Every structure is written in structure tokens, then in C-alpha cells.
Amino acid sequence: MSFYDIGQQLKNILDTVQSGSPRLKAVYDYPSPDTDTGYPYATITPKDAEETFLDTALNQTSYRFLIRAVDVGSDKAQMESTMRKLADDILGELRKEAHETFGGTVDRVEPFTVSFGWESTNQVPSRFFEIQVEVLKHYPI
């Protein structure tokens, strides 16, 4: 298990959301897009990891990733509606039974933390939300 493997699992999940939802225009497995491919888009970024002693035979590693979705536009009401629905789409896919262990890649996916916010760049508002995903993996010592 590695940051790469978990990131790929998250990208596959978001690609599934993108293919099934007209709301998500692009998915990136790095912090920000190189070009404007449409809004809203989502990025997947590794955040951190922490390994702890579990018992005499196992250590437990907690990997954290951040999914950040961004929409830009002048119609704040439309952006708000789109982003709430997109958050529901992504969370719904993450919660599916098939993703409880990312297909056996990890031992457990922890409950999610979600936060919403607004930013303004060049007088154009952007709406975003972030989903923190934490997964646990046990390693023999």
C-alpha cells in the first residue's frame, strides 16, 4: 500500500463520478490543473500519513488525502446548487460498499470530513469544497 495506490483508487472513484454525472468536468490526481478544462473540476492530493503501534505483530498506518472540487462563475446561486449536488455525488460513490476497503487495497476507510468555502480571484467568485479521506492499513512488524 502506498500513496500512489490509494491515489489511484480515489482517481478511479472520481472518474466513475465524472462518467456518471454531468456536474464534474475533470479529475486531476495533482493539486491544480495545468489548463482550463472546464468547471467544476476535482483534484486529489496526498496530505499526510501517520504510523502507530497497534499490537505486538502489527503497526497501523493512517493515510490522509484531500479531494478538492472547484467551480468558478458569476452566478453564485447556480454554483452553490452545483457544488452541493457534486459533493453528494462524490460522497455517495465513496460510501458504496465496493469502496469500503478500496477493493482490498486498504483495511478500512474512515468517516469523511467535508468543508465548504468561497474564494475570489480577479473579481470572479469560486466555490469549493474539500473532502478529507482517511484510510487505514495494517502492516506486520
Image (spheres, rainbow, N blue to C red):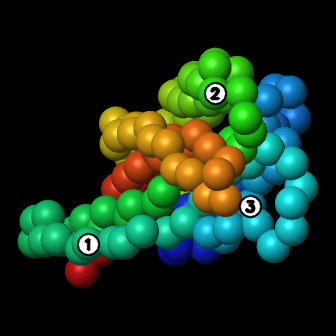
> Which three-letter amino acid code belongs to the residue tagged 2?
Lys
Asked whether residue 10 appears in the rendered view, the answer is no
Q: Nearer the viewer, residue 123 or 5?
A: 123
Q: Label 2 vs label 1: CA separation?
A: 38 Å
> Which element type, helix, strand or loop, lies under badge 2?
helix
User: How many numbered badges does the structure rendering display?
Assistant: 3
Q: Residue at x 84, y 42 (%)?
A: 25
Residue tagged by mark 2?
Answer: 76
Q: Residue lying farthest front?
A: 123
Nearer the viewer's eye, disc 3 or disc 1?
3
Tag 2 near tag 3, CB within 8 Å? no
Residue 53 place in picture, x, y as percent: 13, 71
Screen quadrant of the C terminus: bottom left
Q: Is residue 75 above or below residue 26?
A: above
> Which three-letter amino acid code belongs to the residue tagged 1?
Glu
Q: Label 2 vs label 3: CA separation?
A: 24 Å
Residue 113 place in picture, x, y as percent: 35, 40
